[in-house]
Image (cartoon, grey):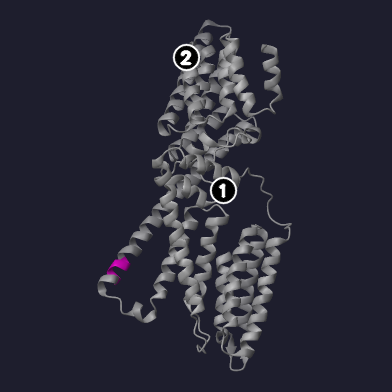
Amino acid sequence: MSIALVVLISFVFNNLNYFRVGTSYNIGKVASAGVFFLLFFVSLLIIDMKLSWFFVSIGVFFIFWRSLLESDFKFKRKKAVFSLSLLLLFLALFFIPHFFGPNFSDVKLSYESSWNIAEKTLTHDVKQFFVGSGLGTYSYQFALYKDKALNAINHSIVFDQGAIPLLTFFTTVGFLGALLFLFAIFFFFYQGFKYFLDFKRERGDHTVNVRDVLFPVVFCLSLLMFFYKIDVVSLMLFFFALGLWDGQQKGEERMIELSNYSKMMAKISFSLAIIILGFVIFNYLNYYRAEYYYQKSVDNFQAGGALSESLVNMEKASSIWKSSDYQIGLSQLYLIKASDDFKQKWTTTDKKAEQKASVRENGSKAEEKAKVATNMDSNNFQAWQNLGLVYENTNLLLEDRTSEAIAAYNIAETLAPQNYDIYVSKGRVYEKMKDKASALKEYAKAFQLNPLDSDLEAKMKALR
């Protein structure tokens, strides 16, 4: 929406002749532009993302800049006043508090925590300093070095990127990768601003120039790298716009003189882009379906619905999309089902035999799904923590699995040493084993990470 609004404003400013019929304006065309402006404006107002107004302000600033360089002073003054008014309006919307849109209360990773994770990752050894920990490994680094204060907010939360992409790049691709990325960004800034400063004042016409629109668009997208988290779609949009801008830099005449080879390569690239886009959309739809069934399963369980319905929906989610989270969910649901069966009071011998068989079957399924989760993502501490929980609970349902539970919790501790809940789980197992000294030791580690847990403090006092 922000890009569309910037493009619309730039088009209007560079194509005022399009809206004229002789000396007067075409009411229909002016009204159409006004309707689109209101559509984009109201949509951004309802969405209520403050960064979007900053994005539009930057774009309008470039339009204001270009209007000052026009040759016709009278024409320039009108455009400059109007563009400056828009700039002030959008900046005001960026700075003032908003009263529209949803009130999101998601826990966000701070810049300080992100920098701390990047610093500890890079200083781990020489290799990680230069080339990082590897792509897609941020969640693992977060679990290793997260701020212990997050335990008091949500001990199970995991972030897969830093507060801004730049810090994520530092962590995953190292100092050299981040340096190359910054060089590419600032080279683009240099070329773009150089073009704006070399603007020829003698251009008397007001026809649209794609570079006038693309540079503010790409510039705003590149600023996201320093101020806000972005996803793959935003990154693809950034490089697509950057490619268009680079092509326009070569000039329209050069574009017409493209050789047949270049045209063929362009067609192949376009076809590949369509195929990749189709693949991305297909995967996204599958992921969306899986998330739908996953959320349906969770909502049904929390509302006290039938456990069988939650299991069916979780099975659908895991069959559509391969995710360790879905396997963990399945494992926990099967464990709950085994526990419910175990609590049933049957009187006849046949019913007791059926009860034992059901407990064993669901307990085994809980263990199986938990192991699948650890195999799918061996660096996911939550998968190992869940496996430990399954072993801990099947002590009562099936057989003694205490040693396996401690082993799984130890792996989870290695992957997430700052997660206090793991130490609580280990302490609980030791306490059941009547090993009070080991239980107190683990509880003390947990309390050091989360001193606000009054229940844990009371438990430690009771044990002492």
The spot of residue 324 in percent (x, y) is: 46, 34
Coordinates of residue 84 in the picture (x, y in percent) = 66, 76
Q: Residues within 10 Å of mark 1 (few under 14, many from 20)?
A: many
Mark 1 and mark 2 lie on one chain; the one further toward the N terminus is 1
Residue pictured at 50% horizontal, 12% vertical: 356
* CB-based contact (under 8 Å), mark 1 and mark 2: no
**Residue at image point 66% right, 72% down:** 87
Dominant SS type (magenta): helix
Quadrant including the N terminus: bottom right
Closer to the camera in the image, 201 or 1 = 201
Question: Of the numbered discs in the image, which one, if any, rests on residue 436?
Answer: none
Task: Indicate whether residue 2 is drawn in magenta.
Answer: no
Residue picked out by circle 1: 163
Write the start and end of the magenta stretch as one range. Answer: 263-267
Is residue 241 in view?
no
Q: Is residue 451 above or below residue 284?
A: above
Q: Which mark is residue 403?
A: 2
Q: Residue 247, relative to residue 71: is it above or below? A: above
Q: Secondary structure at mark 2?
A: helix
Secondary structure at numbered mark 1: loop
